[in-house]
Image: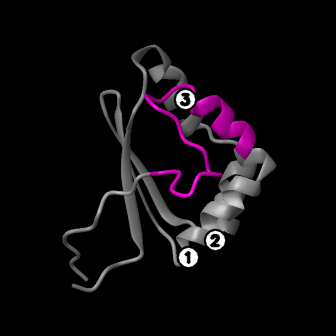
């Protein structure tokens, strides 16, 4: 099967943080958007189902993109806030900071 350059994962947001998490993503910092574009993320969407969120984006070089985000001061500040809101945590300095869901179907 041909694989796309799409990546997806889910996170569960702590119920007591739900409103703040949604508000941050409805009004993202401009520098966060720019850093993600520079990293190579595109067509990035987040969907909500209660306190579970589904994230999906496209990227040609995920390792380079994650390294860029890990080195970004602005993303570090954003992640310091949002990582406390999710069940579990994420650290872009880890080898696999986000556990992506495997793609099992792709219609071109």
Vertical arrangement, residue 21 with respect to residue 100, above or below: above
Crowding near pointer 1: few (<14 within 10 Å), some, many (20+)?
A: few
Instruction: Classify mark 1: helix, strand or loop.
Output: loop
Would you identify the image quadrant in which residue 87 lies? top left
> Magenta span covers which residues?
76-98
Disc 3 target residue: 23
Q: Nearer the observer, disc 2 or disc 3?
A: 2
Crowding near pointer 3: few (<14 within 10 Å), some, many (20+)?
A: few
Residue 52 is situated, as x and y percent measured from the top left of the image, at: 33, 34
Q: Nearer the viewer, residue 6 or 70?
A: 70
Q: Nearer the viewer, residue 108 or 26?
A: 108
State yes or no: residue 80 in magenta: yes
Instruction: Classify mark 2: helix, strand or loop.
Output: helix
Marks 1/3: CA–CA distance? 29 Å
Residue appearing at x 32%, y 57% in the figure: 101
Which of the numbered marks, if any, corresponds to residue 61? 1
Residue 43 is situated, as x and y percent measured from the top left of the image, at: 47, 65
> Which sits earlier in the primary sequence, circle 1 or circle 3?
3
> Which sits earlier in the primary sequence, circle 2 or circle 3?
3
Which of the numbered marks, if any, corresponds to residue 15? none
């Amino acid at each position: 099967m041909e694989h796309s350059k799409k990546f997806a994962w889910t996170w569960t947001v702590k119920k007591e943080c739900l409103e703040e998490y949604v508000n941050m993503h409805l009004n993202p910092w401009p520098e966060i958007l720019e850093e993600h574009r520079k990293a190579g993320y595109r067509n990035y969407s987040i969907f909500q189902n209660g306190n579970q969120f589904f994230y999906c984006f496209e990227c040609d070089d995920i390792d380079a993109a994650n390294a860029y985000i890990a080195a970004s001061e602005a993303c570090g500040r954003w992640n310091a806030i949002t990582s406390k809101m999710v069940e579990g945590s994420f650290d872009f300095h880890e080898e696999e900071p986000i556990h992506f869901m495997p793609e099992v179907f792709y219609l071109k």
